[in-house]
Image (spheres, grey):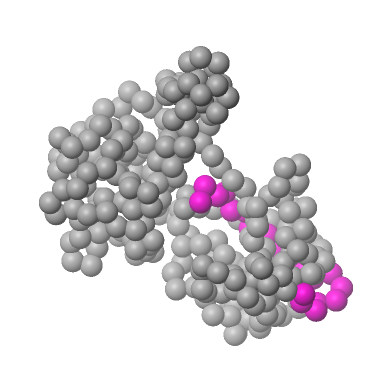
């Protein structure tokens, strides 16, 4: 999955006193694009040595011993260009750790950008020196990074699992998914999302694994469960364009191994679930 970068490690301890150095990675975003240069088939992120005169910086985290910083501005430079973050999506062993770092930086960049001003009184926010938070110096309102819980659900009926395809956007096989609502447990979210999207009741809900998904601020939480009673699918066509009971051997996986959804489908396909 996207976070499986061992033996590398993303060290997200907040320390605003860490100084940038020549080898530090610099992430600069413009909307949903990130500054890169291309070397062969790979995209490389600039180091401070390459772009040091161009930006003002904020420390984010470290990838192993390499510190990573966020550029507060955007700029066009010879040899570099802004590329859609989805174009960099990869599960290649040598580049995947940098992709994961970039997506985490993208999530933080969006949070910083969306919280420049206090949502309570409108004053400009400042950065807390003790923890990763922004604070209003006027009314003392504190805002932490946005993390949105959502469920991924593998619904099983004997030797079949329910595969779906979204009505728009992502074109590959997926599982039932949805955001947790206010006052709802994750297990209740599983039951509600399955019933809303395909009209099925489920039982034996059990946790599998979780995954940070910085593209959209999600913390994905995977569950398997069994259909309870009638397995007839009643598809919500506003959300899905297909929902099909699929035998293990007929499962077609996604084109990369980054997502929790793909791993859960793969586990069932290989009879490990």
Magenta segment range? 216-234
Q: Is residue 231 magenta?
A: yes
Measured as percent of width and height from the top left, residue 69 is found at 30, 37
Residue at left offset 48%, top offset 15%: 137
**Farthest-out residue, left:** 78
Q: Is residue 264 left or right of residue 101?
A: right
Residue placed most toward the observer, 254 or 77? 77
Residue at 79% in and 62% down: 204
Residue found at the very far top of the displayed protein? 138
Residue at (31% x, 51% y) in the render: 34
**Viewer-side residue, 10 vs 125:** 125
Drawn side of residue 53 relative to residue 238, left or right: left
Can you see residue 20? yes
**Where residue 190 sits: x, y (%)?**
73, 58
Foreground of the two, 89 or 55: 55
Image quarter of residue 71: top left
Residue displayed at 68% across by 49% down? 180
Label total for image: 0
Residue 55 x, y percent position in the rendering: 22, 35
Residue 211 to residue 142: above or below: below
Quarter occupied by residue 70: top left
């Amino acid at each position: 999955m996207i976070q499986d970068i061992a033996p590398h490690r993303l060290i997200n301890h907040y320390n605003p006193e860490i100084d940038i150095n020549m080898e530090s990675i610099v992430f600069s975003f413009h909307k949903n694009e990130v500054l890169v240069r291309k070397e062969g088939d790979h995209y490389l992120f600039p180091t401070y040595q390459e772009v040091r005169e161009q930006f003002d910086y904020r420390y984010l985290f470290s990838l192993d011993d390499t510190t990573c910083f966020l550029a507060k501005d955007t700029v066009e430079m010879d040899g570099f260009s802004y590329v859609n973050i989805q174009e960099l999506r990869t599960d290649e062993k040598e580049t995947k750790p940098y992709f994961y770092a970039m997506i985490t930086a993208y999530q933080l960049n969006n949070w910083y950008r969306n919280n420049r001003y206090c949502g309570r009184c409108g004053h400009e926010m400042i950065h807390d020196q003790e923890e990763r938070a922004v604070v209003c110096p006027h009314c003392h309102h504190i805002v932490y990074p946005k993390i949105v819980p959502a469920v991924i659900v593998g619904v099983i009926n004997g030797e079949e699992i329910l595969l779906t395809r979204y009505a728009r956007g992502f074109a590959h096989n997926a599982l039932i998914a949805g955001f947790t609502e206010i006052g709802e447990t994750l297990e209740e979210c599983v039951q509600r999302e399955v019933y809303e999207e395909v009209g099925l009741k489920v039982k034996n809900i059990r946790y599998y694994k979780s995954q940070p998904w910085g593209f959209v601020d999600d913390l994905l939480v995977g569950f398997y469960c069994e259909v309870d009673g009638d397995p007839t699918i009643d598809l919500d066509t506003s959300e899905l364009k297909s929902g099909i009971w699929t035998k293990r051997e007929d499962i077609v996986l996604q084109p990369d191994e980054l997502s929790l959804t793909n791993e859960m489908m793969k586990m069932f396909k290989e009879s490990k679930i």
